[in-house]
Amino acid sequence: MQAGNGAATVGAPVPPAEEIAALLAGVHADPFSVLGVHEVPGGFVARAFIPGADHVTALTLDGALAGELSLIDPEGLFAGSVAIKTYQPLRYRAERGDVEWSVTDPYSFWPVLGPMDDYFVREGSHLRLFDKLGAHPMKHQGVDGFHFAVWAPNAARVSVVGDFNDWDGRRHVMRLRADSGIWEIFAPDVAAGSAYKYEIIGKNGERLPLKADPFARRSEFRPQTASVTAAELSPVWEDDAHRTHWGTIDKRRQPMSIYEVHAGSWQKRADGTFLSWDELADRLIPYVVDMGFTHIEFLPVTEHPYDPSWGYQTTGLYAPSARFGEPEGFARFVNGCHKVGVGVILDWVPAHFPTDAHGLGWFDGTALYEHEDPRKGFHPDWNTAIYNFGRVEVLSYLVNNALYWAEKFHLDGLRVDAVASMLYLDYSRKDGEWIPNEYGGRENLESVRFLQRMNQEVYAAHPEIMTIAEESTSWPKVSQPVHEGGLGFGFKWNMGFMHDTLSYFARDPVHRKYHHQEITFGLVYAFSENFVLPISHDEVVHGKGSMIAKMPGDDWQKFANLRAYYAFMWGYPGKKLLFMGQEFAQWSEWSEARPLDWTLLQYRMHEGMRRLVRDLNFTYRSKAALHARDCEGEGFEWLVSEDMEQSVFAWLRKAPGEKPVAVIANLTPLYHDHYEVPLPVAGRWREILNTDAEIYGGSGKGNGGRVEAQRQEGGWARAGLSLPPLAVIMLELE
């Protein structure tokens, strides 16, 4: 059957010499055209590449003998006729001396993806990419294994390499789907838990560093960087009531107090290693419930190689970090939170990605996920690459990732990092370092379209979820619907509130009267967006010191100031967020390398701070006036806004049909034994919170639990209050 010139026709058992050379060199662009089962005149032939074998026998899947293959190249290439009647998968019995092993032929299987997948991928409208790309276990043509698929449209050749093929790029060269640029292969007999990467040859023949799977659902523990095959996630969910509640109510009118957590350093094991998700569940969930927080917001838990990046330099956007165990553990953690009514928010980073060799950078030898021009594709602040949001496949990759976390892990929210850096083409850039948009402006219109699309798709598929923008500029309508010209986020971090109030509270009280507007100005825009008030990790790192260390005065005044600040914030319109450790006034600046200083709770002032935050949470949650109109102007009314000489502020929080709550802040160390405050209704008002209470570490000054408001002309009333030094009190009409 061999051609007379020593070469061969493609259909012959022995392929041409140049094809053999390409196969053995691992540069053949389409091994499926040569290897596997092929029909020839008179029957079928099989060709297999099995390095190390001396003899190979072809078998059908049921074990019947199909034929003996001949060694046609000493590196392990075999070919021969097989007694089968149709295309079908084959299994080979390989022998070398007295060693015998079995190989199921990956080139004898049909493709898994179809033309509709190609169409939707190319259109950018595929909303189930996470079920199609990456590594998925399946039974294909009667054989168990993993289907691998990766987008690399400009590659000359892509192989999946791993534990299962000795990291040999010649064994599982993938099939190119030319219409979509996706390479795929079904790898039979591969088991869950196998490490793997993609070996890619660029269009000019260059062999790239091995790449982790962009859609990997599990990764190796750092410093290893391979992806890991994983079973499909199938946790037992017991959270229908929780998800139904959040999917049917107006989130803006719900109490929302968020505890921001870095999973790797909240607590650690005695030997300094990371807690697993199950260990975190045993410790963190009860703590959060006891403290009265409604949500946990994790700094990014997606896979990342470098601990000091805190997760913001992620290389595995679909994989929960191996630091805390398998992905199922994270699902169990979320389920455990939901069973006790606690939501879970994930810090999500679609703005940029690190340039680690195994990551997305120059993935197929070209600027595939990023812009080629560094004026658009390189982030000077973080030395990272910026996603090319104008490319439909990249936009789809990120939109699918948001949907993936919502669907597979039942997340309650995505806090989107660094939105401002995405919105402006000149962000952190000088003249000449950026390219204007098509209209000559600085707005990144491609990024705007991505954010709008992401929010539309997430809210459409998962009404129970919320998206929160970390956005520090005056970009309009961040948290308004897309159909009204907004970006479509549910909430926005109020960075202005954080900067102004921290600046004010860090001042010596004797100077505060000159900076009165740092408190009052925030109410000018407090209802322009649906705001979250963030005291986040960013405020207690990089030399900024802890919250307690920022406060002025001696130790007593520092604690009094911080207690007043927290109560001020919990009484202010907007949802609340506090970073771990600040609830008990940790002295040291946060470091990801060590756990929080929990031993401080043995001291009265630190335990008092923790008790105050706990009571603030439960007061905020139980009083609708304090939360139901957090995002609406009619829920707020100034009572005292111009007493700059004494640095006293007072306001009313209101909600329809609910008792109003008055918040009064005395932000100097001067004690007022009879300070008159206007109140809307005469009668008895109960003191529901006082940050100067002894139980919180204060001096115990107050109003004996109640004050009497006397009616005045014009319908309002006035009450003479005892205002403790550096303290906030809250009054509720009885």
Image (tube, helix red, strand yellow):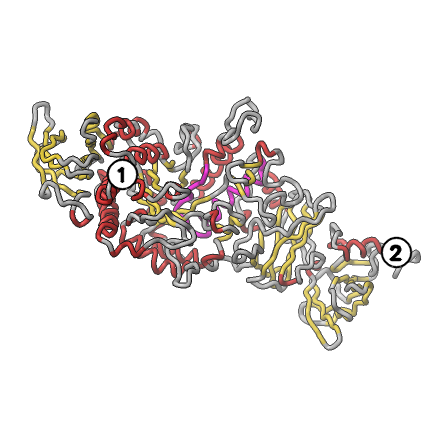
Magenta segment includes 399: yes
Mark 1–mark 2 Cα distance, whole angstroms, equals 87 Å
**In the image, residue 94 lies at what x, y percent?**
73, 70
User: Which residue occupies the foreground of this view, 199 or 261?
Assistant: 261
- Per the rendered image, the range of residues in magenta is 391-418
The residue that appears at 29% across and 44% down in the rendered structure is: 548
The residue pinned by badge 2 equals 7
**In the image, residue 649 lies at what x, y percent?**
20, 31
Q: In which image quadrant can residue 473 be found? A: top left
User: Which residue occupies the foreground of this view, 12 or 87?
Assistant: 12
Quarter of the rendering occupied by the N terminus: bottom right
What amino acid type is highlighted by mark number 2?
A: Ala
The residue pinned by badge 1 equals 552
The residue that appears at 81% across and 57% down in the rendered structure is: 20
> Residue at the right extreme?
4
Give the mark nearest the N terminus, 1 or 2.
2
